Image: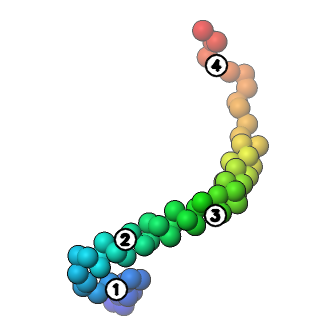
Amino acid sequence: MNEHPKPFAFPDISDAAVIAVNHFLEEFYTHFQNHYFAQIHRYYADLHDRARCNDQMPLPLDDPPF
């Protein structure tokens, strides 16, 4: 059977290096989201609005209002 190679093969590194890389990635991700917030927000808002338009509430409603 052919096994697929692991997409990420991480080498063993020191604890300090792990913390440094982790901190860098967190900072990068935060700055990325802050910079592109409007575009990210618009993309997900558009997805939500399109999905909402496709939903049809079944009529008549079987439950009484109270």
Q: Residue at x 51, y 66 (%)?
A: 29
Specify the amino acid type for callout 2. Answer: Asn
Residue type at tag 4: Asp
In the rendered structure, find residue 37 and report the number of the disc placed on it: none
Instruction: Please name the residue that numbered disc 4 is placed on.
Output: 62
Q: What residue type is labelled 1?
A: Ala
Against 3, residue 32 (above or below) is above
Position in image of residue 59 (x %, y %): 73, 26
Residue 30 falls left or right of residue 12: right
Q: Earlier in the sequence, mark 2 or mark 4?
A: 2
Say which of marks 1 and 3 sits in front: 3
Report which residue position mark 2 lands on: 22
Measured Cα–Cα span from mark 3 to mark 2 = 20 Å
- First in sequence, mark 1 or 3: give its number: 1
Q: Name the residue under label 1.
A: 9
| Nearer to me, 14 or 2 | 14
State which mark lies toward you, 1 or 4. 1
Q: Name the residue under label 3.
A: 35
Location of the N terminus (image quadrant)? bottom left
The answer to which of marks 1 and 2 sits earlier in the sequence is 1
Dot 2 crowding, Cα within 10 Å, few <14, some 14–19, many 20+: few
Instruction: Say above or below: 42 vs 26.
Output: above
Residue drawn at point x = 47 percent, y = 67 percent: 27
Give the image quarter of residue 24: bottom left
